[in-house]
Amino acid sequence: MNPAAAAPAQGLDWRRLTRRLARQRNVVIGGTIVAFVVAVALLAPLLTPHSPEETDLFNTWAVPGSPNLLGTDKLGRDILSRLIAGAQTSLLVAGAVLAITLAVGTTLGMLAGYVGGRTDSVLMRIVDIMLAFPEVVIAILVASVMGTGTLTVVVSLALVWWPGITRLTRSFVLVIREELYIDAAIVAGTSTAMIFWRHLLPNIAAPLLVRASVGVGFIIMAEATLSFLGLGIQEPQASWGGMIRDGLPALRTDPYLALFGSLALGTTIIGFNLLGDGLRDALDPKLQGR
């Protein structure tokens, strides 16, 4: 009998997890907000009442009403349409950054924790160096060197987010690799890649899921910060950070642009944070009996 088969990875019980998630208020509230934002982003071309880039210099800083439900900006562009397009931009950037950081950080973290030795030492020293600097400062520096644009935002944010994922992954792998089923898989001649895929990854999926859900909010905030500073998404592409920046000079006389941009940004971040907190509570063994 194959020892590796006799000791399968201890993955998630998805049925029990679903029931626990349904009882978590934060998951329900946060999940509803996140689902709404994702739906708006996916259906953006169908939901925008006007072209987000269409200007009308004869209708600048219009107050909310018909035909512009949330008013217009300094170029006469419809604020509601740009908010919807901004949701698409924010989630596109967040999804790309998460995909890169999870792929790179999880792989390097499993290598460091499982292989150990010099590989672990070198990777962890690199991580320590990266974590020694404020994340936003590094992102601003990279964006300043690379220039502006969506690709720059994705690269700069991915560069500062992978060390945290790597360290988190390594900490869990250090515990898991001492389990008997890992020894059984090694004795059975299971390759390192298969051990990573069948035994390590299923056991670290839950905490990485929590980290990712909370991280989306911070990534969206970082993207808005870069755009606010003029280093991120550029005109005419819509960005919540850029909308807030453009609305500040007219905050006293025409507050709608900055107000609605801040409201969309804040609500989205709160939604992802609530979802992450709820997932953490649902996946915490100490709280499963509550």
Image: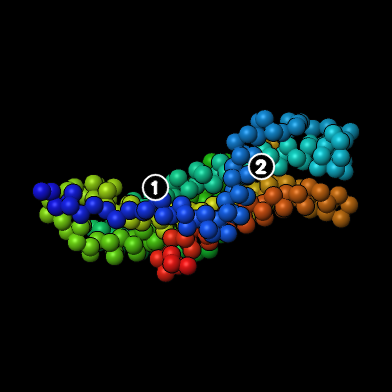
Could you tell me which secondary element the residue under label 1 belongs to? Answer: helix
Mark 1 vs 2: CB contact within 8 A: no
Q: Is residue 117 above or below residue 11?
A: below
Please report the residue visible at 47 percent of the width from the left and 57 percent of the height from the top: 20
**Gap between marks 1 and 2, in whole Å?**
26 Å
Res 42 seen here: yes
Give how far across and how far down residue 71 sits, in percent.
83, 41
Give how far across and how far down residue 222 sits, in percent.
59, 54
From the image, tell me which residue sits under label 2: 86
Please report the residue visible at 52 percent of the width from the left and 51 percent of the height from the top: 157
Circle 1: residue type: Ala
Q: Is residue 78 left or right of residue 210?
A: right
Nearer the N terminus, badge 1 or badge 2? Answer: 2
Please report the residue visible at 28 percent of the width from the left and 47 percent of the height from the top: 197
Give how far across and how far down residue 271 sits, in percent.
61, 54
Res 219 seen here: no
Could you tell me which secondary element the residue under label 2 belongs to? Answer: helix
Q: Is residue 127 above or below residue 265?
A: below
Give how far across and how far down residue 282 sits, in percent.
47, 60
In the rendered image, the residue lying farthest to the bottom is: 286
Circle 2: residue type: Gly
- Give the label on residue 175, or none: none
In the rendered image, the residue lying farthest to the left is: 1
Locate residue 91: give its quadrant: top right
Q: Is residue 252 left or right of residue 197?
A: right
From the image, tell me which residue sits under label 1: 103
Mark 1, residues whose alpha carbon is within 10 Å: few (<14), some, or many (≥20)? some
